[in-house]
Amino acid sequence: MIASLFTPDDIDAFSATDAPTCILANTDLRSLESLVSALREQDRFVFVNLDSIAGLASDAGGIDYLAGIGVDGTVTTRGTIISRVQSRQMVAVQKLFVTDRLNLPRATQAVASAQPGYVQIMPAPVLPFIRDEPIMAVSPVLAGGFIATPHDVIAALACGATGVSTSARALWTYKKERK
């Protein structure tokens, strides 16, 4: 389970849990280093959504900056920067918005070319419709978007997702029951 953090209140709520992993998004560059530092001091694994940090360029300098402040991984729609992220020993997640089946072959080719550590497929409710498509086998899948209940988590995992990201605070510490 990966907590998606969009507001200062989200960060405070996440810090009060034992959830190990988060994605920082929608923050500004000026506060990013202190947020990452505080979360790393709590032994949290911190992803940063490169595409949603005001003032952060998604170029070599921006990626080097993130590595320098201790970010563990990045989330981005830009496949062209995945290799740079990985060369700095960060985990690269390539975000993919699935809008219809027609874009799946091109998306599959792009993800296969970029070779991210994970592909985040959004929105999660599309997973049942693409569970047998090649995109599900290119990189491990994280499901994101519209994950609000334990049922949503179970459904995403049943469709082949390796993990789930959500802003639903009640799910940040959710653990699937073992049978």
Image (cartoon, rainbow, N blue to C red):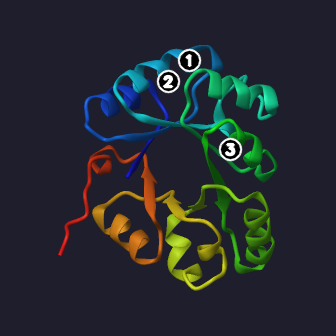
Query: Hey, what amino acid is under mark 1?
Result: Glu
**Mark 2–mark 1 contact, CB under 8 Å?**
yes
Helix, strand or loop at label 2? It is helix
Image point (77%, 79%), residue name: 102
| Nearer the observer, 125 or 162 | 162
Q: Which residue is mark 2?
A: 36
Please tell me in which quadrant of the rendered image residue 85 appears.
Answer: top right
**Inter-mark Cα distance, 1 to 3:** 20 Å
Residue 97, placed above or below residue 28: below
Where residue 178 sits in the image (x, y, percent)?
Answer: 20, 70
**Mark 3–mark 2 contact, CB under 8 Å?**
no
Residue 171, placed above or below residue 30: below
Q: Which residue is mark 3?
A: 86
- Left or right: where does residue 116 sit relative to residue 38? right
Q: Badge 3, how many Cα within 10 Å: few under 14, some, many 20+?
A: some
Image point (37%, 52%), residue name: 1
Query: Hey, what amino acid is under mark 2?
Result: Val
Helix, strand or loop at label 3? It is helix
Closest to the camera, between mark 1 and mark 3, is 3
Q: Point out which mark residue 33 bears.
A: 1
Where residue 70 sits in the image (x, y, percent)?
Answer: 55, 25
Residue 130, placed above or below residue 156: below
Closest to the camera, between mark 3 and mark 2, is 3
Image point (77%, 35%), residue name: 58
